[in-house]
Image: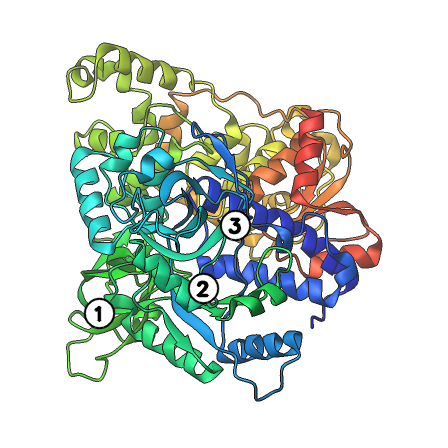
Amino acid sequence: MTDTTEADAANELMRLARQIAKHNRLYHAEDSPEISDAEYDALVRRNAELEAAYPHLIRPDSPSAQVGHEVAASPLRKVAHEVRMMSLDNAFTDDEVEEFVARVRRFLALPDDAEVVMTAEDKIDGLSCSLRYEHGKLVRAATRGDGQVGEDVTANVAYISDIPQELKGAGLFDIPAVFEIRGEVYMAKEDFLALNSRQAEAGDKIFANPRNAAAGSLRQKDASVTASRPLRFLAHGWGAASKVPAAAQYDMMRKIADWGVPVSPLLVRCSSAAEMVAHYRSIGAQRADLPYDIDGVVYKVDRLDWQDRLGFVAKAPRWGIAHKFPAERAETTLEAIDIQVGRTGKLTPVGRLKPVLVGGVTVTNVTLHNRDEIGRLGVRVGDRIVLQRAGDVIPQVVENLTRDEPREPYHFPDHCPECGSEAVAEEGEVDVRCTGGLICPAQRVERLKHFVSRAALDIEGLGEKTIVEFFQLGWLESPADIFRLRKRRSDIVGREGWKDKSVDNLLAAIEAKREPDAARLLFGLGIRHVGAVTARDLMKRFVTLPALREAAEQASSPARGGGPANAGGGDSQHETAAETDSPLHHPADGPPPRAGEELLSIDGVGPVVVEALGDFFHEPHNIAVWEDLLSEVSPPAYVVETKDSAVAGKTIVFTGKLETMSRDEAKAQAEALGARAAGSVSAKTGLVVAGPGAGSKLKQAAALGIDVIDEAAWAEIVRQAG
């Protein structure tokens, strides 16, 4: 059961339907999953929990009724499955396996002590495929697609040696006239590593894992590409059949093997839940040594007449279930700890590992996050550690097996390894940062990358590789140097990868930013705590960059009106710089406000931001960079252009996780539509846009009777205003 209210449940079911559909499309149709199997399973389980608690809220597009995903735009021909290719429900605990067996007994009205024989086999992480044989000869192969319509890959599977074009004993009486064998196309771990090695040498795409490699290799318009990839196949069942020449699942799978199609060597019969779980444990112990990736064990009722009686629910059989494995772990040795310095000066320790295969991916590095995490784990160079891919995606250290062995402890640096400046952690923070600022070469490179990034000046053609190259040549040390690259045209032409046209395109893109958007320029400077939205909020108030600088300098100087430490709150009633004789204050308004108050009166700007601005303009080298940059560019006065829209004049709150855009982008959209984005819900709030994980703000909105929409509805509002 769930303690979620009915209104919240309806909202969450709507979001889950869209979210799960998105991840189904990425996994099944595009072979490019964004989340791990474990994260996907958690979404599905949450959906099932809510539907069980509120069955009257089950949606027509419920994920419970969906299998896979419709076939995306593809050069491969679509084909319909005669018998739908179903998916399986999941179990994650021993108790759930026992409940599955008990559920079968209850449905069949069997006594509690009646033996229910099950088959158990490893669940390969591959691409589902159905092979249609007529009179023993392969006539069609198709991917699962959405379970009803897949893609025709007949020409491609001709190059998979495990898949016979003609079954052994074709023409004999026990091979049906029509029989569809279903299973998984996969790539062995060893073959996957060799393929990626060849891809890297050729400068081609590197595959994330064996499943993606297998899917991408099979779903090729050019079958010769498939022929060059080492694909394999294991059968696990069947679909359409003119007859089934066996009375049990296990016996039928043995016949399929006799016909020359491989089946799992780990397929067994079990007569109890205890035996099923024991086989699950046995397979789990072998998991790392198996030649292919698996993510669980599949149980099926052995008797086929019982399978017929049990039938199906919306998308899965009642007679089968997948017992999933937890995230895979592996042991390796921590060979070194390196320190990386980021754009904001943060010192991030990175563990260099003896390469180890975890969940089909070779892991050589792992982030150790910060000084406190190293202390918690007690890791030192030479330690034996347990590694886990968090959510089967991000490597993380979960245990130090040798922390009690005598070994020199790791001393976190108190000076920046790049520039030698002192490295400190601010009060209340765990991160250690270099104090060198723009004199630190690591920060300069990262800040230059940030300055030209899409959310900042967005200079096309000036990517990370070029930034590093030009920095190493001494051509780029500060943002202003970018605008002086035109003087180095002759030096750039002729360097590897640079021709007249590409150099001219780059210089033209740079020149096009001579009058940049002031908020983007401010954000691009990388001032700590000044994100894209805060930069826009600041520029809306001060309009010009010199006016903002004056406010920041006043806020940081006690002699000129105090700073954030003693600044009061409240909304400023003073006009903006665009409407005054002074950039900050109109004489008719009486005594000027303290600048700290002027900054703090901006919604979303607090003492931390004010302090960061003050610190930035307190450093002489930052002022030098600022003035040098403004000698090369001339950002016009900042004007917010808004459109007529259904939300103009409203205060909008975004809460929960946004899946198709960043929070900053959403707020910018609201501003462009004439609305105001706020961080908290109040009686003045006109609309709440709620994504997954929305909590107290959603409840506050419901209590106040405020309209709540999801991200898709918000996107429609933006589109209509477009």
* Residue 361 percent location from the top left of the image: 28, 55
Height in image: 307 above or below 706? below
Residue 246: image tag: 2
For marks 3 and 2, give the one nearer the viewer. Answer: 2
Task: State the CA–CA distance, disc 2 to disc 1.
Answer: 67 Å
Determine whether label 1 and label 3 are within 8 Å by CB: no
What residue is shown at x 78% (from left), y 32% (from top)?
646
Task: State the CA–CA distance, disc 3 to disc 2.
Answer: 21 Å
For marks 1 and 3, give the one nearer the viewer. Answer: 3
Tell me if 623 is positioned left or right of 190 in this view.
Answer: right
Q: Secondary structure at mark 3?
A: loop
Height in image: 33 above or below 248? above
Q: Which residue is mark 3?
A: 85
What residue is shown at x 66% (from left), y 45% (from top)?
601
What residue is shown at x 24% (from left), y 72% (from top)?
385
Q: Which residue is mark 1?
A: 411
Height in image: 26 above or below 262? above
Q: Earlier in the sequence, mark 2 or mark 1?
A: 2
